[in-house]
Amino acid sequence: MEAAVLAQYLLPKQALTMLAGQLAGWRGGALTTWLIARFVARYGVNMTEAANPDITAYPSFNEFFTRPLKPGVRPLADAPLICPVDGAISQFGKIECDQIFQAKGHAYSTTALVGGDAALAAPFENGHFACLYLSPKDYHRIHMPCAGRLRRMIHVPGDLFSVNPTTARGVPGLFARNERVVCVFDSEAGPFVMVLVGATIVGSMATTWHGVVNPPRPGHLRDWSYADQSITFAQGDEMGRFLLGSTVVMLFPASFGVRFNPAWTPGGALRMGEAMTAL
């Protein structure tokens, strides 16, 4: 096991993440602006795409991290499924029975990913998945890969390991053991799931219909049903956001007939709105 991965088992990840969340919401005036400037330089953030490229306009790190983009800088491809985020491809492909490939020697089950609900996971047996990683420099809003109607949301408590490629290779079942928010949608092609996976220093995750989901972190599973409401989204609509970076895992049933973009490869860069599947 790599030293960077081993160290994560020893670190007080929950405490670090809570502290990071508090600091990210702090409005420190000139000091906050200086820190944002350092972050932009360190990670090569492209502020020319931001709706407001002036870093002095962001009173806190939270508002900087979740900055909107200028209209038109992420055109939507003409494809059945589009990429919901800026980032990189961690893994994608077929779900083998109920097993999702994480990295060489590591897999996890669809049931574990969605919080232990076997009935929820069942439609995705032998379907397809895509796991997309957002780095600190990336645009942190999450959009819909296709049109859908919200059916359910589950907040699953868990660990807060980093989700970078090194950790994905070293921590078994990483995405099914970290804290996560499971969003269940219905579409014309069938149900699909978007899982927002938390990580070390990711202070919170939010959805457009609920607001901030975590904190609080009560330590037990929380489940919301929206079956009696009509919360609908068009392809490309914003559905959520991360603070800092993390991972989105998507599950599609075999009925979707997913044929991934032939240009996709693990580690490849992505931009929101690009074609995730071929026509």
Image (tube, rainbow, N blue to C red):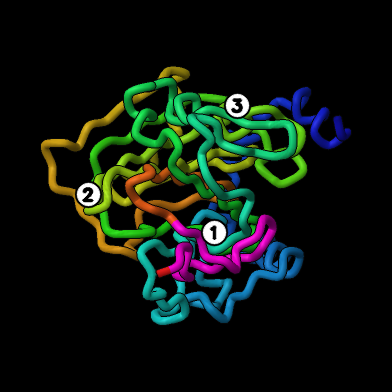
> How many marks on residues?
3
List x then y, in percent, for residue 96.
Answer: 53, 35
Quick one: label 1 or label 2, which is nearer the N terminus? 1
Which residue has dot 3 on it? Answer: 159
List x then y, in percent, for residue 257.
Answer: 38, 53
- Along the line of sight, which residue is nearer the eye, 4 or 195? 195
Which residue has dot 1 on it? Answer: 65
Q: Is residue 260 depicted above or below 217 in this figure?
A: below
Instruction: Look at the image and tell me whether residue 30 can be seen.
Output: no
The residue shown at (35%, 24%) is 222
Q: Give the crowd class for mark 3: few <14, some 14-19, many >=20 residues within 10 Å.
A: some
- Along the line of sight, which residue is nearer the eye, 188 or 17? 188
Q: Is residue 187 left or right of residue 32?
A: left
Q: Could you say which disc has been placed on residue 189 in the image?
A: none
Image quarter of the C terminus: bottom left
Q: Is residue 3 depicted above or below 119 in this figure?
A: below
Q: CA distance from mark 3 to mark 1?
A: 22 Å
Dot 2: element: strand
Instruction: Look at the image and tell me whether residue 47 can be seen.
Output: yes
Q: Are marks 1 and 2 in contact (CB under 8 Å)?
A: no
Q: Give the crowd class for mark 1: few <14, some 14-19, many >=20 residues within 10 Å.
A: many
Dot 1 amino acid type: Phe
The residue shown at (51%, 58%) is 140
* Span colored in magenta: 259-278
